Image: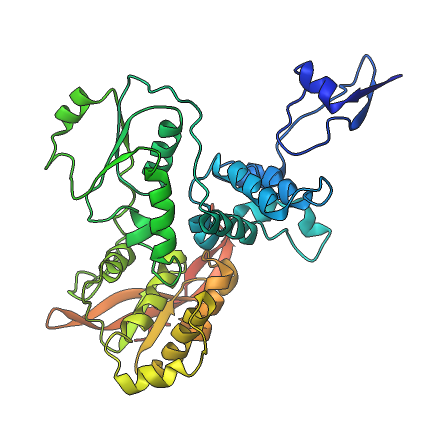
């Protein structure tokens, strides 16, 4: 078998390799060549394969890790990491706070080290760095295309579509029904998880590419869809998934029974929600955890000045960490007045919510009843006053890969 020696620069010039990450051009690549085996194999790393956005994770991590090797200032290396990251994802600070990071499940290092590389934390760090440095997106062309595009919805899908189109020179207009942009990022995720100054800053960075945003404009009502199709060469529909899942048991139409989506929308919109002092949340996903933790915070909205001042003693400086500590202190002080319980039909091991968020919910005082499912909402005068439940046991795995919950006959309770 013959041995061939090439530099990275040689392979790039021949079109056999692309430099998608920092590497010295004179690095020698040694390969073997025979009649029955290839000399070069290129494939995506497992972390990138698991990422829904297909972020170049290896690329932006390498930019930072090799800064010292290539004698680059750290800020310059992180700037480059930000540019690599935002090539696919224009909302790194946002996603660094809310993403369930499936990339880490595919990380090669998780079997060799104490765990996977903290990719999600790195994404947040890089995104926050970009905001602090005032980094701006670069257009991929100075040409202004003659095709106009309308985007319906300003959630993560609509914003990402508009971002990629604007970078490529297309005039884009976003139409949004609500008063502010962000979609479920703003109206479905509580402020304690996603600070609005972070969300606003990253949205504005996208709009600064020259994107027009029309708020409080509902397609089909304020603007006929046929008119939209006539005035624009293409229409991208990104209306989001704002409709929540119904409970599907007798009594679930009571006035004070909400889907998680509608409840979080009300809370995040600043609307007053009368939840009383006892709240039951059904489910084990991210929305259930968000609804439970938001309910504790709703109970704080009418706290007295003495409670507020006493809680402030828990922190000395109200920075980002301090605000979170103050929030937790206030919740702890009020927890005896508001009782929030999650009913989940499986065990904690099967809960699809982010583990960190589950732990924080428990620390804040949320109670979780496992292997419990609702069978009826008991009403009084049109409002729910109790929930009739049944105990469950786990059977064989279902299509989701989790063990199937099976009701235990005769175990009903209220």
Quadrant where the C terminus sits is bottom left
Above or below, 158 relative to 305: above
Please, which residue is most extreme toward the right here? 1
Above or below, 361 relative to 399: below
Name the quadrant containing residue 59. Answer: top right
Which residue is at a point 33% across and 24% down the rendered structure image? 170
Which residue is at a point 64% across and 33% down the rendered structure image? 21
Quadrant where the N terminus sits is top right
Q: Can residue 336 be seen in this view?
A: no
Q: Nearer the viewer, residue 9 or 103?
A: 9
Q: Nearer the viewer, residue 240 or 400?
A: 240
Above or below, 29 relative to 186: above
Which residue is at a point 12% across and 33% down the rendered structure image? 223
Q: In this view, does 333 lie to the left or right of 127?
A: left
Q: Can residue 160 be seen in this view?
A: yes
Q: Is residue 49 left or right of residue 388?
A: right
Q: In this view, does 30 lie to the left or right of 206?
A: right
Q: Where is residue 290 in the image (x, y as percent from the top left)?
A: 36, 62
Name the quadrant containing residue 286. Answer: bottom left
Q: Position of residue 393 (x, y in %)?
A: 46, 64
> What colour-coding does the image apply?
rainbow
Which residue is at a point 25% across and 19% down the rendered structure image? 233
Q: Nearer the viewer, residue 103 or 87?
A: 87
Total numbered labels: 0
Q: Position of residue 5 (x, y in %)?
A: 83, 20
């Amino acid at each position: 078998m013959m041995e061939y020696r090439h530099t990275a620069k040689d392979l790039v010039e021949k079109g056999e390799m692309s430099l998608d990450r920092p590497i010295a051009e004179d690095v020698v690549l040694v390969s073997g060549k025979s009649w029955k085996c290839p000399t070069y194999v290129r494939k995506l790393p497992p972390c990138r394969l698991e990422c829904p956005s297909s972020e170049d994770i290896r690329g932006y991590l390498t930019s930072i890790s090799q800064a010292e090797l290539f004698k680059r200032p750290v800020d310059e290396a992180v700037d480059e990491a930000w540019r690599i990251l935002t090539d696919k994802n224009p909302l790194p600070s946002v996603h660094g706070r809310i993403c369930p990071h499936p990339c880490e499940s595919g990380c090669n290092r998780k079997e060799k080290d104490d765990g996977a590389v903290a990719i999600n934390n790195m994404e947040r760090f890089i995104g926050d760095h970009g905001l602090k440095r005032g980094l701006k997106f670069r257009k991929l062309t100075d040409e202004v295309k003659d095709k106009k595009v309308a985007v319906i919805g300003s959630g993560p899908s609509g914003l990402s579509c508009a971002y990629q189109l604007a970078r490529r020179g297309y005039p884009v207009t976003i139409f949004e029904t609500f008063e502010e942009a962000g979609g479920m990022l703003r109206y479905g995720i509580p402020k304690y998880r996603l600070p609005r100054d972070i969300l606003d800053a990253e949205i504005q960075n996208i709009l600064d590419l020259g994107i027009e945003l029309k708020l409080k404009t509902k397609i089909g009502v304020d603007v006929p869809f046929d008119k939209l199709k006539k005035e624009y060469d293409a229409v991208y529909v990104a209306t989001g998934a704002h409709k929540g899942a119904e409970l599907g048991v007798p009594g679930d139409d009571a006035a004070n029974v909400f889907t998680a989506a509608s409840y979080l929308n009300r809370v995040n919109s600043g609307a007053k929600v009368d939840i009383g002092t006892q709240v039951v949340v059904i489910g084990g996903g991210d929305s259930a955890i968000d609804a439970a933790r938001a309910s504790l915070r709703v109970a704080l909205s009418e706290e007295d000045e003495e409670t507020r001042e006493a809680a402030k003693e828990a922190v000395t400086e109200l920075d980002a960490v301090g605000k979170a500590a103050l929030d937790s202190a206030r919740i702890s002080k009020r927890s005896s007045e508001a009782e929030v319980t999650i009913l989940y039909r499986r065990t904690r091991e099967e809960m699809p919510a982010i583990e960190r968020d589950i732990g924080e919910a428990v620390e804040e005082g949320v109670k979780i009843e496992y292997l419990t499912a609702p069978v009826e909402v008991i009403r009084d005068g049109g409002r729910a006053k109790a929930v009739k439940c049944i105990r469950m046991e786990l059977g064989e795995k279902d299509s989701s890969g989790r063990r199937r919950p099976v009701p235990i006959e005769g175990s009903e309770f209220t």
